[in-house]
Amino acid sequence: MSSAETLKRHHLRVTDIREKVLEVFINSSKALSNEDIEKHFAKLDRITLYRTLKTFEESGLIHKIPHSGQSPLFAICQEDCSQHEHLDQHGHFHCLKCGETICMDEVNVPSINLPDGFTAQQRHLVIEGKCAKCT
Ligand SMILES: [Zn+2]
Ligand SMILES: [Zn+2]
Ligand SMILES: [Zn+2]
């Protein structure tokens, strides 16, 4: 499926920026920060990029990955995420050596028993260590 078709499937208007940003995510094997994405563009307005990422996240195209660094990281959604629900219940791995963060689709986030009165909305699992390339 082309990036334009993916945008349409998620009920988004196709624009040049959206198509290009989505392609950067599709072609990347690691999670990306705003700065990583900016490198793929000769000129890209930060506000436009910020809005594009927010729209993508809200539409189920990309998901945000919590990590200890300063700028947020995003990765393409593999599963059938939609506007209403993100289904990316997989763990993430952050390599302390090369700094890459990757989705681990085969690692499930364990369910946790919460005390009475607490309701979970999202569960995240981030493992830090050395990736296969750096070991
Ligand atoms: Zn998702
Ligand atoms: Zn590494
Ligand atoms: Zn992920």
Image: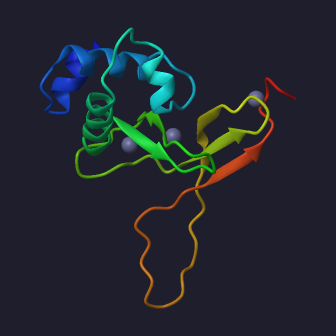
Give the quadrant of residue 111.
bottom right
Find the residue positioned furthest to the right: 135
Q: Is residue 1 visible?
A: no
Quarter of the rendering occupied by the N terminus: top left
Q: Residue at x 46, y 37 (%)?
A: 74
What x and y, as percent, mark residue 77? 41, 35
Is residue 55 depicted above or below 126 in this figure? Answer: above
Residue 129 placement, left or right of 61: right
Q: Residue at x 67, y 41 (%)?
A: 93
Residue 18 placement, left or right of 92: left
Quarter of the rendering occupied by the C terminus: top right
Give the quadrant of residue 103.
top right
* Near-viewer residue (65 or 80): 65
Is residue 1 depicted above or below 80 in this figure? Answer: above
What x and y, as percent, mark residue 17? 25, 18
Is residue 56 depicted above or below 122 in this figure? Answer: above
Residue 79 placement, left or right of 104: left
What x and y, as percent, mark residue 87? 39, 48
Give the quadrant of residue 19.
top left
Residue 80 placement, left or right of 84: right
* Near-viewer residue (77 or 44): 44
Q: Residue at x 76, y 39 (%)?
A: 96
* Near-viewer residue (60 or 40): 40
Q: Is residue 131 visible?
A: yes
Find the residue positioned furthest to the top: 42
* Near-viewer residue (109 or 133): 133
